[in-house]
Amino acid sequence: MGRHATYKMVAMVQGTNIVRKELGLPEAECLAADPRYSLTLTKS
């Protein structure tokens, strides 16, 4: 999967979670947005 597709997918899940939170519904876990699971090197 391309990087842009991954970013778009993460943004869609995060946007859905905003609506779910406002409606009092359970939020979906989005591991792709968690820096601990990133495949790129980042400064700590």
Image: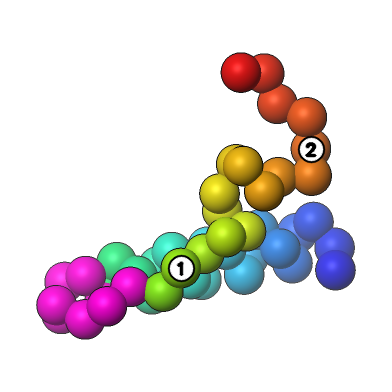
Report the quarter where the C terminus lies: top right
In this orientation, which residue lies closer to the viewer: 31 or 13? 31
User: Which color mode does the image show?
Assistant: rainbow
Q: Position of residue 30 (x, y in %)?
A: 52, 64
In this orientation, which residue lies closer to the viewer: 44 or 1? 44
Report the quarter where the N terminus lies: bottom right
Q: In the rendered image, which residue does mark 2 sit on? A: 40
28 with respect to 22 (left or right)? right
> Measured along the vertical axis of the image, is residue 2 above or below residue 23?
above
Q: Is residue 5 magenta?
A: no
Give amino acid for label 2. Thr
Give amino acid for label 1. Glu
Q: In the rendered image, which residue does mark 1 sit on? A: 29
Q: Which residues are magenta?
A: 20-27
Q: Residue at x 67, y 48 (%)?
A: 37
Residue 43's disc number: none
Q: Secondary structure at mark 2?
A: loop
Q: Position of residue 35 (x, y in %)?
A: 60, 41
Could you give the CA–CA distance between mark 2 and mark 1, rounded to whole angstroms? 20 Å
Q: Residue at x 29, y 66 (%)?
A: 18
Q: Residue at x 16, y 71 (%)?
A: 22
Q: Residue at x 74, y 67 (%)?
A: 5
Graded by Cα atoms within 10 Å as few (under 14), some (14 to 19) or many (20 or more), the crowding at tag 1 reads few
Q: Is residue 22 magenta?
A: yes
Q: Position of residue 28 (x, y in %)?
A: 41, 74
